[in-house]
Amino acid sequence: MEVAAHKTKPVTVGVFLGDALARYHFGEHHPFGPSRYPAFVDEFRRRGLLAQVLLPEFTEAARSCIEYFHTPQYVASVLAQSASGLGFLDHGDTPAFHGIYHAAAAVVGATLAAVRGVMDGCFTRAFIPVAGLHHAARDRASGFCVFNDCAVAIAALRREYAVQRIAYVDVDAHHGDGVYYGFADDPALSIVDIHEDGGTLFPGTGAADETGVGAATGSKLNIPLPAGSGDASVRAVWTRAEEFLRDSRPEFILLQCGADGLADDPLTHLRYTPALHRYISQRLCAVADACCAGRLVAMGGGGYHTGNLAAAWCEVVGAMLASARDGAS
């Protein structure tokens, strides 16, 4: 499928909110707790952004859509633990609770609604705060991630819209291993993943020499940064990353904009500021406008300091809205 590079109508931005997303958390004493979602919404309202965006509806993803990426056996196991509410879905980071299947399926549903809304012309760009669960593998949960909505979105673009050249950009402090290894042999999925070096942070992957497998070698760009890196470190590599993206001629761009790289996050060791999220989002809006009719969906990802994630994600949406006002990034 070829997507025209020019925009044919004004840029509009959809933001996905609602109680169904708020239910995806693991309790008060877990890093991925219940305060993350309301922290974003409160700041979003305080900045006056709510009145400037569309608020599309969404529903829980169908099991058949979740299985675009995940194995039926794994989906069945999540259903069983969702009913029992017992145990862990991985080795100890991702506890089960009653209804976890439905909470995770709602995240996938929101991301699919964002992708479909962009593809169907309902809005040009979109943001989902509780999404970007990039660690889940085809057959298992990992790192607070039950279903990998990023990967399901990639598969949905292929199956439902025949989009082939997709760019996945991940600036979460943690390497997006579920997406990378899920598509390591896919030459039409270009990945740019800027993250803290795996030597100091879970999941320990994403080395610079991981560039894809077989025919896909060279289609993935992993950029690990040393602990303590800040905005300047990312800006120093961004020109290379953006050239890589433009050379891939994407028909659609997905951004996992985790906020756990900001200074004082309790789980990581980077020192970004919210300004970096605005910069990256501005640049990706420009790439999207030049390559794929503006089509860009951003997913919140990690972030365990609520003030940080609220500020960073508001900068992402703010950059999308600014590009709409400017008429071009």
Image (cartoon, grey):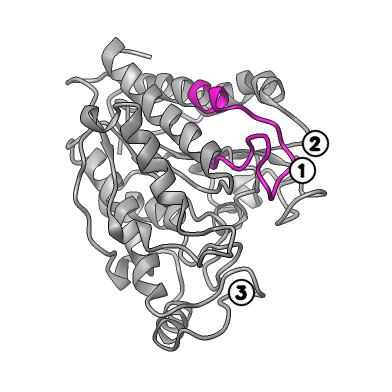
Question: Residue flagged by tag 3: what amino acid is it?
Answer: Asp
Quadrant in the picture for the C terminus:
top left
Asked whether residue 311 is drawn in magenta, I would say no
For the question of whether residue 168 can be seen, the reply is: no
Direction from residue 20 to residue 92 in the image, left or right: right
How packed is label 3: few (under 14 Cα within 10 Å), some, or many (20 or more)?
some
Q: Residue 114 placed where, x, y %? A: 29, 45
Direction from residue 236 to residue 133 in the image, left or right: left
Mark 1 and mark 3 lie on one chain; the one further toward the N terminus is 3
The Cα atoms of the two marked residues, 2 and 3, are separated by 27 Å
Mark 2 and mark 3 lie on one chain; the one further toward the N terminus is 3
Question: Residue flagged by tag 2: what amino acid is it?
Answer: Pro
Q: Are marks 1 and 2 in contact (CB under 8 Å)?
A: yes
For the question of whether residue 146 can be seen, the reply is: yes
Q: Which residue is mark 3?
A: 90
Q: Residue 260 placed where, x, y %? A: 61, 43
Give the magenta range.
Answer: 257-279
The Cα atoms of the two marked residues, 1 and 2, are separated by 6 Å
Q: Element at badge 1?
A: loop
Direction from residue 313 to residue 30 in the image, left or right: right
Q: Which residue is mark 2?
A: 226
Q: Residue 161 placed where, x, y %? A: 27, 48
The Cα atoms of the two marked residues, 1 and 3, are separated by 22 Å
Q: In this view, which residue lies farthest toward the right? A: 199
Q: Are marks 2 and 3 in contact (CB under 8 Å)?
A: no
Q: Which residue is mark 1?
A: 197
Vertical arrangement, residue 157 with respect to residue 250, above or below: below
Residue 280 image label: none
